[in-house]
Image (cartoon, helix red, strand yellow):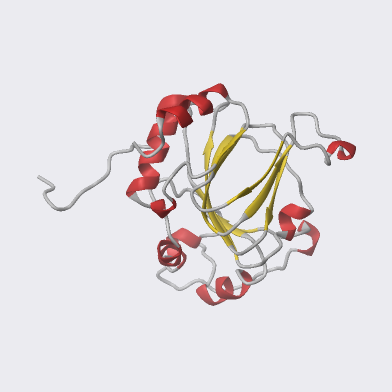
Amino acid sequence: MILTQDILNKVKQRTPFFQKQAINSNIFSWAELEGLLNLRPMVKVDRFFINFIRSDLRPTYNWINPNWATENAYPASLIQEEIKKYVCFLIDCSKANRSINEICAQLEDISKAATDAHIFFSFITKDLSFDQYVHKDVSDNLIVQIDGKTNFKVWDTICPREHFNKPVLDVVTEPGDIIYIPKDIWHGAFSLTKRLSVSFPMAVSAPAAMEDRHWITLSDPV
């Protein structure tokens, strides 16, 4: 088991919590992320996202896809430039590697909800996209810090702006730390260094159409 039974029990309670050194941060790496970013199907426009401070300032991108391409994906040279300026994330990564697949399986078993993995990363020291956009999500989320430091502030279901100075959690996540934030809970993530994290969203309100968690092995496939 990658996640302990204690962590899984806390997730089942669906109450915000933070735990230090809860998991081995080697479940994912910058090298693995680099491989994903260079794999064209992983950076198609509905899978790779660049978070902008304001949607009305979002640049307009135009490019010609290679004639063998089956999907509309960001060019590698464009990604190389944009990741210097913004926080970015990849979705549909629940089978990015065997460890992430196993964590998703554990969370699906305890939550009875389809679970994905979203990979967030940033090279800027201040994540402006979230600084100016305290938000709530439509899924429960277990977030694992892989590298760097991130200040998470978590409020509650009712979060008028005047209450933003009274979070129920105000913590700095470091490699191996986890934080759990249920759906509809207001929160913000503020990068203190470059960061890499994996968020595991659980679609608790959606039909439970689960991923096939079988892991294909080639050492002896028969």
Q: Quadrant of the N terminus?
A: top left
Q: Which is more toward the observer, 88 or 76? A: 88
Residue 62: x and y in percent read 63, 72
Tell me which corner region of the image, top left, top right, bottom left or bottom right, holds residue 48: bottom right
Please tell me in which quadrant of the rendered image residue 102 appears.
top left
The residue lying furthest to the right in this view is 162
Nearer to us in this view, 1 or 182: 1
The picture places residue 196, in percent across and down from the top left corner, at 54, 58
Looking at the image, residue 27 lies above or below residue 165: below
Residue under the point 90% across and 38% down: 162
**Which residue appears farthest toward the front when viewing the image?**
20
Q: Position of residue 25 (x, y in %)?
A: 44, 52
Q: Work out whether residue 214 can be spotted.
A: yes
Image coords of residue 166 (percent x, y): 81, 37
Q: Is residue 83 above or below residue 211?
A: below
| Residue at screen point 47% across, 65% down | 37
Q: Is residue 48 visible?
A: no
Residue drawn at point x = 40 percent, y = 70 percent: 68
